[in-house]
C-alpha cells in the first residue's frame, strides 16, 4: 500500500475538532450528526469529487448534504478546501450570517442545495442526474444521508427512481451513526439491514467502517459498484471522541468548555479556523 | 383543456429542449404524441408524488424547465412539503400542473376533490397561480409560465371544455374582460368563466348586462383591473369560483375592496368549506352551491336591482 492516507485521517480529525469549536462558539449542537461523517466527507472531497472538465464538457461533480443539521462538518470542509474563508466558521449560527445551523443556498451559494427538511436530497440528485444525462454530461452526484433520514418514505421513492432510470453516476452515503433525535435508528428501523434494503431497490450497496480510511477510499474508487446501477455506501460511524460515543444527548447538547478541551485533546487536532498560521 | 395542454406542451418542447414533463403515473394516453417525439423528456416517475417534485427540482437545477403533472389533489396536497422546500425555497422554474382541479372529479370522492389546490399552492411564496377557463387560455398561458424564473401552478380541467371568444388578449397577470357591461361585474377564475357567459344569455332578455371579467391569473392578481372596474361604475362584484373559500379569487378581492375602502357589494358563489360527501354530479353540485348559470344569473339580477 503506497497510498498515504494519514493526511486524510488527520484532516478528518481537524474537521471533528472544528465541529466541536463551532458548536461551542455558536451555541448549537447537532454534533452527533456532524462529527460522525468527517472521514467520509474528507475522502469524498479529496479523492472523489472532480472539478469540471472543459475538454469533455463534463461539469463538476456535486455533493449534496441532505441531512442539513449536520452542517458544521460541511462548512469546515468547504473552508478546508478554500471555498469559503476559514474565518467565516466563527460566524456559525450567527443571526443573519452565512452559516445558519441548517445550510441555506441563499446565505451561502457554495452550498449545492439548502437542507434542513429531511428526505429531499436524494430525490433532487436523481433529477439532476437524469437532466445531466440528457445533456450528455457525465458529472456525478454524491448525497450524504443520515440513517434516521432513511425513515422518510421519500428516500425510497427516490431510490426506486434511481434504479429504474439506471443512474450509475449516483452515490448515496448513509452516515449510520445509530443515533436519531430521540431514539436509536436500529430500534426505529427494527434492526434491519440498510444496505440490503438498497440492494432490494436495485442498487449496488456495501456496508463499511466509516472510520477506516483505506476502506472508504477503496470503496469510492470502485463507484459505481455495478455498471448502470446507483451505489450506496452504508458507513457505520461514531463521533470519534470516547466520552461522547453512543449517547443520544449529543444530537442536541451544546458542548461545555470542558467538553471542548477534552475533545480537542483526544482528537489531537486544532479547529482549522484556530490553526491559521 | 387537457388536449390544449398536451398540444401546447409538445410545441414548447419542440422549440425548447429544456422543456420536459414528469408524471406521477397519471395521464393515460394523454401524452402519447409527446412521448412519440420526445421519449427522453417524458418521465413517468411512478406513484410517488414526492419524487415527481424532487426530480423536477433536480432537473430545474441543471437547467431544465420541467412540468410536473398529476391529478390536482395529488399534485398539490400530497407532495406539499417537497413543493415548498425543494422547489419554492430555491425559487426553481417548475410548472406544476393539476389536472381536474376543483370538483372536476366530483363523483370520485374526497380523495380526488381539489378545492384547496390554489389555497395550498398560494402558501408558497413566489408561486404564480393560473386558472385558465378554456383551451385558448391554456394554450396562451403555458409559454408564459415556461418563461418565468420561479415556480407556477396551473389547474386544467378535462377534455372538451367549450372555448369562448373575447377581444382582450391573454396575458399572464392580467384580468380579461370577456364581456363589457355595466353596474355589476361577474368575476370568474378558471372554469366559472364559461358558466358566467351562459348566465349572461339568461339575463339579456331582461335588459340586465353585467360585465364578465376572467382572472385566469390568481397570483399575481390584477388588482389594477379591479380598480378599473370600480372606476367604470361597477358597484357590485359577483365572484364565482370553484374552490374553497380560502385563498381563491373571492378572498383576494374581498381583501382588496377592504384595503381600497370602496363601497362595493361583493357576493361569493362557490363551494362551502367542507368535505363534499355523496359523490355528487358536478353540475348538480354547482347548482346546489349557486354557481351554475342559473345561480350566477340570479345573483346578478339581485345585484343589478339593488344598485
Image (spheres, coloured by chain):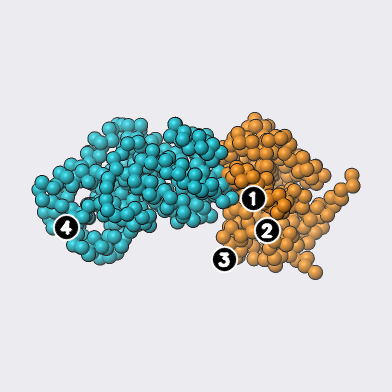
Chain colours: A orange, B cyan
**Mark in the foreground, 2 or 4:** 4
Label 4 packing within 10 angstroms: few (<14), some (14-19), many (20+): many
Circle 4 residue: B183
Label 3 packing within 10 angstroms: few (<14), some (14-19), many (20+): few
Instruction: Say what secondary structure mark 1 lies in.
Output: strand
Nearer-N-terminus badge (3/1): 1
Left or right, A229 with respect to A242, comes to left
Mark 3 on the same chain as mark 1: yes
Closest to the observer, B260 or B25: B25
Q: Which residue is farthest bottom?
A: A277
Circle 3 residue: A96
Task: Give the CA separation, mark 2 to mark 4.
Answer: 62 Å
Circle 2 residue: A75
Q: Are marks 2 and 3 in contact (CB under 8 Å)?
A: no
Mark 4 on the same chain as mark 1: no
Residue at position x 87%, y 50% from top?
A: A4
Instruction: Say what secondary structure mark 2 lies in.
Output: helix
Circle 1 residue: A65
Nearer-N-terminus badge (2/3): 2
Where residue A20 sits, quadrant-wise, is bottom right
Q: Which residue is farthest right?
A: A2
> Where does the image place residue B121, in percent across and percent down from the top left?
42, 49
Amino acid at each position: 500500500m503506497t497510498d498515504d492516507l494519514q493526511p486524510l485521517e488527520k484532516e478528518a480529525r481537524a474537521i471533528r475538532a472544528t465541529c466541536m469549536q463551532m458548536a461551542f462558539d455558536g451555541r448549537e449542537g447537532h454534533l452527533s450528526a456532524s462529527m460522525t461523517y468527517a472521514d467520509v466527507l474528507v475522502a469524498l472531497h479529496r479523492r472523489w469529487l472532480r472539478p469540471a472538465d472543459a475538454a469533455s464538457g463534463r461539469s463538476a461533480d456535486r455533493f449534496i448534504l441532505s441531512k442539513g443539521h449536520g452542517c458544521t462538518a460541511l462548512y469546515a470542509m468547504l473552508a478546508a478546501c478554500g471555498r469559503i474563508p476559514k474565518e467565516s466558521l466563527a460566524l456559525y449560527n450567527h443571526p443573519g450570517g452565512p452559516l445558519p445551523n441548517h445550510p441555506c443556498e441563499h446565505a451561502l451559494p457554495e452550498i449545492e442545495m439548502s437542507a434542513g427538511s429531511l428526505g429531499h436530497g436524494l430525490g433532487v440528485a436523481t433529477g439532476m442526474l437524469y437532466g445531466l444525462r440528457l445533456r450528455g454530461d457525465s458529472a456525478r452526484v454524491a448525497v450524504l444521508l443520515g440513517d434516521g433520514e432513511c425513515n422518510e418514505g421519500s428516500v425510497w421513492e427516490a431510490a426506486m427512481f434511481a434504479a429504474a432510470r439506471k443512474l450509475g453516476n449516483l452515490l448515496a452515503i448513509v452516515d449510520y451513526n445509530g443515533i436519531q433525535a430521540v431514539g436509536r435508528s436500529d430500534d426505529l428501523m427494527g434492526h434491519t439491514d440498510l444496505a440490503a434494503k438498497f440492494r432490494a431497490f436495485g442498487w449496488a450497496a456495501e456496508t463499511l467502517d466509516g472510520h477506516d480510511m483505506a476502506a472508504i477510499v477503496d470503496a469510492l474508487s470502485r463507484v459505481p459498484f455495478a455498471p448502470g446501477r446507483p451505489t450506496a455506501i452504508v458507513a457505520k460511524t461514531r463521533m470519534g471522541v470516547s466520552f461522547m460515543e453512543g449517547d443520544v444527548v449529543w444530537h442536541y447538547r451544546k458542548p461545555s468548555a470542558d467538553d471542548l478541551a477534552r475533545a480537542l485533546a483526544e482528537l489531537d487536532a486544532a479547529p482549522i479556523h484556530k490553526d491559521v498560521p | 383543456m387537457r388536449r390544449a395542454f398536451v398540444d401546447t406542451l409538445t410545441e414548447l418542447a419542440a422549440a425548447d429542449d429544456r422543456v420536459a414533463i414528469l408524471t406521477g403515473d397519471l395521464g393515460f394516453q394523454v401524452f402519447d404524441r409527446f412521448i412519440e417525439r420526445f421519449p427522453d423528456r417524458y418521465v413517468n416517475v411512478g406513484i410517488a408524488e414526492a419524487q415527481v417534485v424532487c426530480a423536477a427540482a433536480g432537473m430545474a437545477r441543471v437547467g431544465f424547465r420541467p412540468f410536473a403533472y398529476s391529478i390536482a389533489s395529488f399534485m398539490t396536497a400530497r407532495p406539499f412539503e417537497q413543493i415548498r422546500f425543494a422547489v419554492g425555497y430555491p425559487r426553481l422554474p417548475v410548472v406544476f400542473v393539476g389536472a381536474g382541479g376543483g370538483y372536476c372529479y366530483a363523483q370520485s370522492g374526497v380523495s380526488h376533490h381539489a378545492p384547496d389546490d390554489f389555497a395550498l399552492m398560494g402558501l408558497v411564496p413566489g408561486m404564480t397561480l393560473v386558472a385558465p377557463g378554456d383551451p385558448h387560455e391554456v394554450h396562451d398561458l403555458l409559454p408564459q409560465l415556461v418563461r418565468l424564473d420561479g415556480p407556477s401552478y396551473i389547474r386544467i380541467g378535462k377534455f372538451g371544455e367549450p372555448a369562448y371568444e373575447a377581444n382582450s388578449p391573454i396575458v399572464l397577470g392580467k384580468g380579461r374582460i370577456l364581456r363589457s357591461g355595466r353596474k355589476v361585474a361577474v368575476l370568474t377564475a378558471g372554469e366559472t368563466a364559461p358558466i358566467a357567459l351562459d348566465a349572461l344569455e339568461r339575463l339579456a332578455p331582461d335588459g340586465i348586462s353585467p360585465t364578465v371579467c376572467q382572472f385566469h391569473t390568481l397570483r399575481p392578481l390584477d388588482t389594477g383591473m379591479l380598480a378599473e372596474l370600480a372606476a367604470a361604475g361597477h358597484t357590485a362584484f359577483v365572484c364565482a369560483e370553484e374552490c374553497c373559500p380560502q385563498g381563491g379569487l373571492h378572498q383576494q378581492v374581498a381583501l382588496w375592496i377592504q384595503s381600497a375602502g370602496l363601497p362595493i357589494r361583493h357576493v361569493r358563489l362557490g363551494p362551502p368549506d367542507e368535505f363534499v360527501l355523496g359523490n355528487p354530479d358536478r353540475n348538480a353540485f354547482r347548482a346546489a352551491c349557486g354557481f351554475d348559470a342559473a345561480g350566477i344569473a340570479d345573483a346578478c339580477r339581485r345585484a343589478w336591482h339593488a344598485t
